[in-house]
Image (spheres, rainbow, N blue to C red):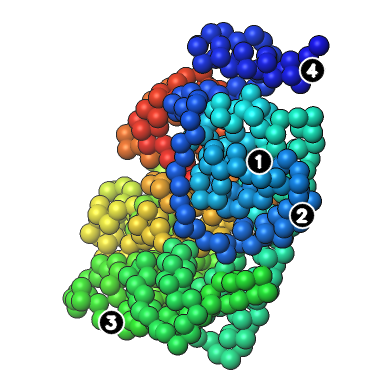
Amino acid sequence: MLSDSTARDRNIARARLKFLENAELPAAVVPEGILNSWQRSKYLGIGTDEVVVPYQPDYDRESRLVRAATPVLDRLEQALTGSDAGVIVTDRNGWVRDRRVGEKRLSAHLDRVHLAPGFNYAEQFVGTNGIGVALEERRPNVVLGTEHFNERLQSVSCAAAPIRNSVTGRVEGAMNLTCWNGPARPLMAALVQEAVEDIERVMYEFSSAHQRALLEAFQQVTHYGDRPVLCLGQDLVLANTAASARLTGDDHRLLHEAAAEFGHAPRTRREVRLTGGQHAMMRCRQVDSPAGAAGYLLELAFTDHPADRPDPRTRPGTGPRTRTEAGAAVGPWPLPGLVGTDPAWNAVSRTVSRCARARTPLLLHGEPGTGKATLVRAAHALTGAASAPVVVDAAAPGSADPGHDLPAALRAAPAGPGRVLVLRNVDAVPPEDEAAVAGALEAATARGTWLVGTLQGALGVPEALRNRFLEVAEVPALRHRLADLPALVDCLLRRIGPGVECAPEAVAPLRRHDWPGNVRELSLVLSRAAAARRTYRIEPGDLPPSLHSAGSRSLSVWEASERDTLVQALLEADGNKLLAAQRLGISRTTIYRKMRAYGITLPARG
């Protein structure tokens, strides 16, 4: 009489043959996870009788994953001596990085099927196997004997689980336990999970040691001066005020790449061109910890000072001076509660601040949501004034009613030194009110009131009103200052609430969006994402589906709904297109076609 496990293996083997012949499978014979993997393997055209996998002999044998796994594998190797089992560690892409086997016969078999360091055992190359399924589905699994897609692997059983970075939550690799088919198979999953937890604990200890070493090095250097200093580790970025005011997240990545070329070369200096076009002279040294290389300490000196350059576009003349000042004072110019190092943003910040101090009437234009009112409030606060700006909207609802008197509203506004009067939508002043409005604005200015007019475009202001303003400046659209996006996100999240963060992976879809609503739209998106988040930080899946699409045309209601459904399915499947297609009941080809049609781009799976 057959044992239960032997009978099960034969049932699975018969079901697999039926599956390969496109026959209908009996219900509940094959576990759902195995069947899903079979379907992916068949779609990818994986062979069933030969193991053909890529080989990459050169890899980092001192990576954090390998270093963390080594003591765990050393312990397991002693315990497995003489047994018919082996343990394998791969990186997040399925490349085998280490292997320990208890007996020579199993070791020879694993060599024959290329389950050895340097080879890749991702599902896309081997088909259904413990390592491939664990990395594809991001969860522990067991693949028993005949459940393997390739017949060459069916004499062994495998249990595997992903190894995660407990600091970032990112999958770093997988641990796999392989043994000959036999009665010990039910214990495999528990043994693998215990080993994974040990590796994750060592990786966390490495992270802590790295962070302590980076913090100590950072404090030693910044204690003796205020030059720009940056510390870059895998999970930590430290920057003093002099560095953070000039650098963006993109600059951090660029400098990290440059530092990796230096290693232990503390006397070497190198000039690096940053993302905003400015240059910095960098001196770098590697920071080591008891757990290995922790990161890099960078001392910077910015070699150009654009704030000191004259603006070639500024010409003396009469009447209003239209200036974006993008080529003038482009150095950082912080205002209370505002962030940004973009040259055009800094230029307009300087202009608004100067006009606030000198009480110079200013006409401020820019797209809706760019922050015109916010700039005025911040510059006004910088002068020490306690009063809030008074805002009168020329395009307010009801302004066309007989009872609405725009000139009277302007004359009734509090006036005098320390006061600000903001006339929104200057270009919407009715023609019949132009003379009266101009008179009211002139009277306010004469009493010492700082006068600010705002509108979307620089054109369309009647001459009688334009003459009331001595300066004109433009607030740049968010899509033109994307280098400021990480700092803006942090600033807006602090306003939303304490402890809210944005995962680095979520910044990429934010960068790809056009932001027609500018900073106001960004704030709304972050507020909704923070309310819907499932962890302490905003992940890509918390962002609205529209941010994962870069289509250039307007979508109908039906198309937008289809796009959102597709994005949601892909996010829930962690980017696995075949799994998303199965859940939606469409083909993988259709998934790719729809993604191209809607410009859908998802963050890389990690």
Q: Amino acid at mark 2?
A: Gln
Mark 4 or mark 2: name the one nearer the start of the chain: 4
- The residue nearer to you, when weighing 479 against 300, is 300
**With 207 as the anchor, is 132 left or right in this view?**
left
Q: Are marks 3 and 4 in contact (CB under 8 Å)?
A: no
- x 68%, y 39%: residue: 178
Q: Amino acid at mark 1?
A: Arg
- x 79%, y 40%: residue: 190
Q: Amino acid at mark 3?
A: Arg
Provide the secondary structure element on which disc 3 rests.
loop
Which numbered disc covers residue 78?
2
**Residues at marks 1 and 3, CA–CA distance in whole angstroms:** 75 Å
**With 338 as the anchor, is 141 left or right in this view?**
right
**Residues at marks 1 and 2, CA–CA distance in whole angstroms:** 17 Å
Which numbered disc covers residue 4?
4
Mark 1 or mark 2: name the one nearer the start of the chain: 2
Residue 165 location, quadrant: bottom right
Tell me the mark number nearer the camera, choosing from 3 and 4.
4
Q: Amino acid at mark 4?
A: Asp
Residue 397 location, quadrant: top left
**With 249 as the anchor, is 157 left or right in this view?**
right
- Residue at the spot of label 1: 105
Identify the residue at the far front of this view: 105
Mark 2 or mark 3: name the one nearer the start of the chain: 2
For the N terminus, the image quarter is top right
Count residues near mark 4 (Cα–Cα under 10 Å), then give few for <14, some for 14-19, many for 20+.
Answer: few
Which numbered disc covers residue 309?
3
**Residues at marks 3 and 4, CA–CA distance in whole angstroms:** 83 Å
In this view, 350 is above or below 131: below
Mark 3 or mark 4: name the one nearer the start of the chain: 4
Q: Position of residue 381 (x, y in %)?
A: 53, 72
Q: Position of residue 552 (x, y in %)?
A: 32, 38
